[in-house]
Amino acid sequence: MLALSRKKDEAIVVNDNIEITIIDIKGDQVKLGISAPRSIPIYRKEVYVQIQNANKEAADSIDIKELNKLLKK
């Protein structure tokens, strides 16, 4: 993990097309602004983890034999 120090209104650039700016700092909370192409999904980590878990559950619930039968019709 790369750890960087930034002050309010300072930014970092990732991969030439993503800019993360420190918008505000209040106590132990930091407000970030993220500029990125629309094709790049951006999620809070807890939401991302929920999406991944839901996708895994959905994939685990598929009966491969039944799916193959449907596809052969």
Image: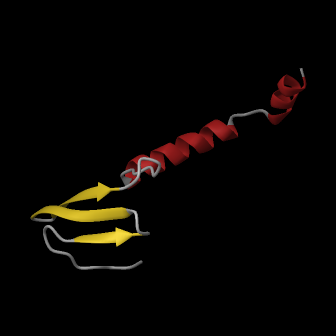
Left or right, 52 with reference to 15? right
Instruction: Give coordinates of residue 41: x percent, y percent.
Output: 44, 49
- The location of residue 23, given as percent across then percent down, is 16, 60
Judge left or right: residue 58 versus residue 49. right
Q: Position of residue 36 (x, y in %)?
A: 37, 55
In the foreground, 47 or 35? 35
Is 11 positioned to the left or the right of 48 in the image?
left
Write the residue at 46% across / 45% down.
Answer: 50
Identify the image's colour scheme: rainbow, by chain, secondary structure or one colour: secondary structure
Which residue occupies 23% across, 64% down? 21
* Picture layout, residue 4 above or below residue 48: below
Query: Residue 57's quadrant in the figure?
Result: top right
Say which quarter of the image contains residue 55.
top right
Q: Quadrant of the N terminus?
A: bottom left
Q: Is residue 25 left or right of residue 60?
A: left
- Determine the residue located farthest toward the top in the rendered image: 73
| Residue at the farthest right position | 72
| Nearer to me, 52 or 19 | 19
Quarter of the image with the C terminus is: top right
**Vertical order, 43 against 65 (above or below):** below
Q: Quadrant of residue 31?
A: bottom left
Q: Residue at x 86, y 32 (%)?
A: 65
Residue at 39% in and 55% down: 45
Q: Is residue 59 above or below residue 39?
A: above
Q: Is residue 44 above or below residue 54?
A: below
Q: Which residue in the rendered view is the most extreme toward the front? A: 16
